[in-house]
Amino acid sequence: MDKGIKNIVIWFFQLLCGGILLVTSWAKLSGQPVDIRLFTELGMEPTGRYLIGVIEGMAAIFLFTHRLAATGGVLALGTMLGALLAHLSILGFNGENAAMWSTVMISSLIVTIARRRHLPLIGSTFED
Amino acid sequence: MPRVSTLTINLEKIARYVNLGLPLVVAFFFLAGRYYSFYFHFFTVAFFLLTVMNFFYRHVQKRHALLANFGLVAQGRYLLESIGPELRQYLFTNDTEERPFTRIERAEIYRKAKNVDASSAFGSLLDFDGSDFKLRHSLYPMANREMIPYQLIFGEERGLKSAWTMTKPILISAMSFGALGSHAVRALARGACKAGVLMNTGEGGFPKYHIMENCDLVFQMGTAKFGCRNDDSSLNDVKLQEIAALEQVKMIEIKFSQGAKPGKGGLLPKEKITKEISELRGVPMGRDVISPPYHVECFDPESTVRFIRRVQDVSGLPVGMKLCLGREDEFYQLLQTMKRLDIFPDYITVDGAEGGTGAAPKAFMDDIGMPIFKSLPLVHKLLIEAGVRDRLKLMAAGKLINTGRQFMVLSMGAQACYTARGFMLALGCIQALTCNKNTCPVGITTHNKHLQKGLDIEDKSERVKNYVMNLCHEHIEVLTSLGKKSYQELDEKNLLFPEKA
């Protein structure tokens, strides 16, 4: 693929993923009733809610940069895996957020893989 | 036989345990998260990602054998290796080990540049039985008041109206805008103006930033002739005339070869080519600019000599040539041709193979060209034997950052010394060895404006001036200790040649 077009595509996924995370992060940090209910069920209210909110916020900010996008991608992947665990083990599924979850999961995977050379510590092992 | 027990770290075993243990750790944290507290799932996720990474290293990627065999544990090696250069420079390399300049050599320049006490105590830290040249002092040192001030007149042999008198035996060697950032060029130029030394523009085209500070300049014309070129790299007389007419330009230097990459043209990596540089040089952006290895006008001794005459005629200024000596017989033929045609450059700069550069292939930097202490005496001798030593001036370059080395070459026949890296150190160079990457941490060899911010032009120009002034002061002290009234009296008898050299 042409380098310029590839870059635009990756940026599209960065913005998509970062945008969603920014919204979810804000929801957690501002204490939306749905989030408070979920985190109460998990036994993490309010510390866990703030913690995840901050991590999601950081991921979003990182995803809006070029250099740190891969790091943001990994953080996003982590929070999504955590969410999966929560729904698998405690919350159960009702399908309401499945589309959003898959979007973040897939786009953060794409960003992390595409920008893997910028990953901290291990990035250099991907250089040609 | 008694058993000798030694403490060993069996990396292979550790790697095996880690590879086996990682999934178990994930399982452990999963259970803890499931039955004790959901917070444990932070670890579940983190270790799960590590496990995936480990799997990728060992079973998917094929590029790194070490990672394929040992997985994540082997990553430690790459991490340590990556911080190796810093660890060595800061902690583990001793004061005389670093290259190209040792910590002792650098500290001397920093002290001169900052104008602080440069005396040392107790004894030399160098390997005194090593094979370095030494200077021989006189039993009858000279008094300071008897000294004859230094002066060197370029172009006097041809009776030029534009002959130029130099009053200090030190020049700032060729560094182009391109190799250096604009702040560094201006700090050097302003410092040169304050100190009254001549600055070489380097082969970077029209010297936009060099002329800003009104210092005296030598315009260097490289093989690509940036600033005065036609599209086929040949000389454009009109453009050269325009540059020679600039008030600041006192001399022209034709660069035939450079010590760090003799037989190869200049090289400016694409990372360092900004829009401005591409305009000043007339080259495209986005790829390395590689100058041709030769002047298209020069293919044998006669054409070379005639080209020198052409530049002399067109510019009307003193014209010198810079070269790194390769083959003695070729230089001999060139001299004979000069003699036959009665055309001489106004000066020759001999560059030693140890010379510095912004970018060069490693083989050229390490293994090609003659070092200055070998080539300079040879050139001097050939000039004397041909009976033409008085027809031109001779200058030297190649790691001549301190008084000691400068006096070595001054005793070997040079009449003035070029140094580039000495002045870079005076600007605050920390020898990070990233001149070719546009990431110079002290803002000297970079065009990144954030990195250049730290290089304050006024402050650093003062350091450049201090460096020159302290060198000159030390020069006088050394001259008197050698029992000489002037630089002209220096000769090889002042040198102690090492036995091995």
Image (cartoon, grey):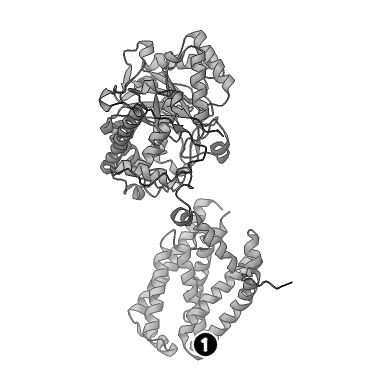
Q: Residue furthest front?
A: B139
Front-most of residues B154 and A69: B154
Number of numbered markers:
1
Based on the displayed image, in which of its 4 quarters is residue B245 positioned? top left
Q: Which chain is mark 1 on?
A: B
Q: Which residue shows up at 51% across the image and 40% down it?
A: B130
Based on the displayed image, in which of its 4 quarters is residue A126 positioned? bottom right
- The answer to whether residue B116 shows anywhere in this view is yes
Residue, disc 1: B32
- The answer to whether residue B175 shows anywhere in this view is no
Q: Secondary structure at mark 1?
A: helix
Seen in the picture, residue B238 relative to B134 is either above or below; the reply is above
Front-most of residues B234 and B401: B401
Q: Position of residue A122 (x, y in %)?
A: 53, 63
Q: Position of residue B87 (x, y in %)?
A: 47, 57
Front-most of residues B204 and B487: B487
Q: Position of residue B285 (x, y in %)?
A: 46, 40
Seen in the picture, residue A8 relative to B149 is either above or below; the reply is below
Front-most of residues B6 and B308: B6
Residue type, numbered disc 1: Ala
Q: Position of residue B316 (x, y in %)?
A: 36, 15
Around disc 1, counting alpha carbons within 10 Å, would you say few (fewer than 14), some (14 to 19), or many (20 or more)?
some
Q: Which residue shows up at 47% across the image and 86% down it?
A: B38
Q: Residue furthest right?
A: B1
